[in-house]
Image: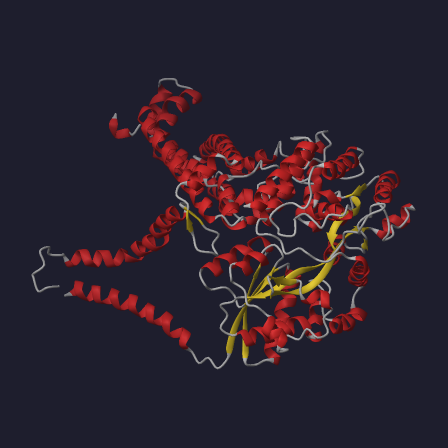
Amino acid sequence: MSGKPLRFKINSNDITGYLLISPWLIGFAVFTLFPLISSFLYSLTEYNLLSSPEFVGVGNYLQAFEDGRFYQSFKVTFTYALVHVPLKLVFALFVAMLFNCDRRGVGIYRSLYYLPSIVGGSIAVSVMWIQMFGSTGAFNSILGKIGIETTTNWIKNPQTSLAAVIILAVWQFGSPMLIFLAGLKQIPRTYYEAAEIDGAGAIRRFINITLPSLTPVIFFNLVMQLISAFMAFTQAYIISGGAGGPSDTTLFYALYIYLQGFRYGRMGYACALAWIIIVLIAIVTAILFKTSGRWVFYGEDE
Amino acid sequence: MKKWMMVLLVILLSLSSLFASGSSESGESEKTTIRFMWWGSQTRHDQTIKVIELFMEKNPDIVVEYEYGSFENHFDKILTMMTAGDAPDVFQNSTAYILLHAQSDQLLDFTPYIESGAIDLSDWDDVFKTLGEVEGGIYGLTMGNSAFGMLYDPVLFEEAGIPIPTNDWTWDDYHETLKQIKEKTGLYGDSCYPASMIEGYVMFLRQHGYPGLFNADRNGLAYDGTDLWVEYFTKQQEMIDKGYVMPYDQAIDSIINFEQCGLALGTAGMLGCINSNQAVAIANAKGSAVALNSYPHMEGETQPGNFIGPTMFLSAAKTTEHPEAVARFIDFFLNDVEANEIMMMERGVPASAEVRSALEPQLDSVAADSSRYVGIVAETAVPFDNIYPSAYNEILDLYRRTVEDMMFGRVSIEEGGRAFNEQAAALLAE
């Protein structure tokens, strides 16, 4: 300070405010902004974590386009996202509608059905999945009961391994279900009453009232689930034994980034891969937002 | 006024937390503290913690802090810590990483401590002393040694009247045994054919006179062509097709987690290609004894191809501030009889002759069998050259992926062999 009076008078309220949110601001700077910038810088280098990074320009980005496993991981991740997200949302909505009533004990059921989502990302469930779909697992003994004797290991067979992971993900429908439930509670009862008086059946009411009123919630769930699908890691890591097998059929994009960065010592390339997916997620989300005007109805617009 | 007090309070709070974390470190430090990190199973964790406690009891001036976990994450953590300049003073290392660590100048050279006797290798067999040698320095000391072999269920063999295999058996004998197990017991002969493991392929190459997978400079493959590959995997396919060996989707479980293999679960009579120190874990998982037998020999082979290798190394970080304490700890871990009586060769057969002779009378039958087996292999073993190139992890994944592609019929065996050779050579040349 050169003794000149300050031109801006900083309100002491502002200072207090900034100080109070400073834990978040510092956290954002240190744990989000800094890694974001440095990962971009590393993506322009060849870096194995131990020796100092060497600048290679856009070499890593070019390398990705010649890398067969890069395309494979893309294919796996997009298949996963496109199949499991709609399935999961339909399932979550279905269960939410079952729970949207005032029967006794419905609270207990809601909690029970939410449980898989709490433990779902965890290692224990993935390990359980390996057992269930293993050659001597529960799935095969159920098949045996209905007359189909098999010892196929569904998790380790390239034709079914991804499907097993998708089923695991769909099963964790708890959090979109809760959001749907909250959305359902928001729909005014009067709509339904009016429709009933006009003689609309259950299906008609669902299509003409429930779905349109719920579109903002569906949109929110869709975006959130798609983003998390693109970043899926834990289930694939555990189920495939950390390598994306068999035959790279569960090589999720995030898993591939991890393998390149930590197992193969190509942190620079891994950072470049991470940036490619960030850009793609941004594009997909932008498209969703652009098109949302056509099918998402916010009450106040009407 | 009140607002300014609030501001002051916030500043004070954040400052005090800073000081609090700063002051806790400047406690009285008469004692030297070193950090040790390892991976393993629960059995190993319990044993290792007991050894550390014994060490601190005998060396009251040293405190050993420890951290442990599973193999999958161990090296991620080590790499990250090294990058941050905060590597543990002592850690369990492996043949797949020691070259990378040493060449990146991250490891402490043990040579001066071995010369001064701080780490006493005087009763170590010579071959074991230099297992962790990289470019003239000793960067790792073997924690135990093992050899590859095959496991079988002796009770099953006896009850079904199948001839017990001998250590000089050939590939034909092995295939015949698989057939007999299938025919006499209905079980699969083997949980997985040895070609499923890269180590099995390497031994097959050695039996044909090659030094191993890599050339001496570790920048290319040691062999040309796909003849051996095709021969080996065609046999594997034939054995699976005949039902003598488990179908590949089920065999994968045996490869990823040995405790889930067909032999342990009672659905197969053998387990092809396994590290001898893992016999104990598999016997525990199975709940009954298993016996070790040699990897099959080739008729007219130039060398048996088997070798004695370290199951894991002890390495120390170059950044350690207390190399003397580190040396004392390593010496204790590797050479102290009492410490090794806690561990009972869980990490393989110790390099110290004194420790070996003290432990041998106390071993249970499977562990004794495993230790004896290492002795048998040692007589004809080829020199150990498995300080793997830094591309090894990727080659390992490539191998596994290629075998899966072939066994699930996505590529032909010939194509798989060509793809493996081409990609592995490119990785080595990188």
- Does B250 sit left or right of B77 as displayed? right
Front one among B371 and A240: B371
The image shows residue A47 at horizontal and vertical percentages of 46, 51
Give the quadrant of the N terminus of chain B: bottom left
Which residue occupies 34% across, 25% down? A295
Can the viewer see residue A155? no
Can the viewer see residue A223? yes
How many numbered circles does the render carry?
0
The image shows residue A20 at horizontal and vertical percentages of 26, 58
Which residue occupies 15% across, 59% down? A12
**Residue A167 drawn above or below residue B394:** above
The image shows residue B8 at horizontal and vertical percentages of 21, 67
The image shows residue A277 at horizontal and vertical percentages of 42, 38
- Does B43 sit left or right of A243 as displayed? right
Front one among A213 and A256: A256
Which residue occupies 56% across, 73% down? B326
Most distant residue in the top direction: A199
**Residue A140 drawn above or below residue B260:** above
- Does A130 sit left or right of A273 as displayed? right
Front one among A291 and A190: A291
Front one among A256 and A13: A256
Residue B133, quarter of the rendered image:
bottom right
Q: In this figure, which colouring scheme has been used for the structure?
A: secondary structure
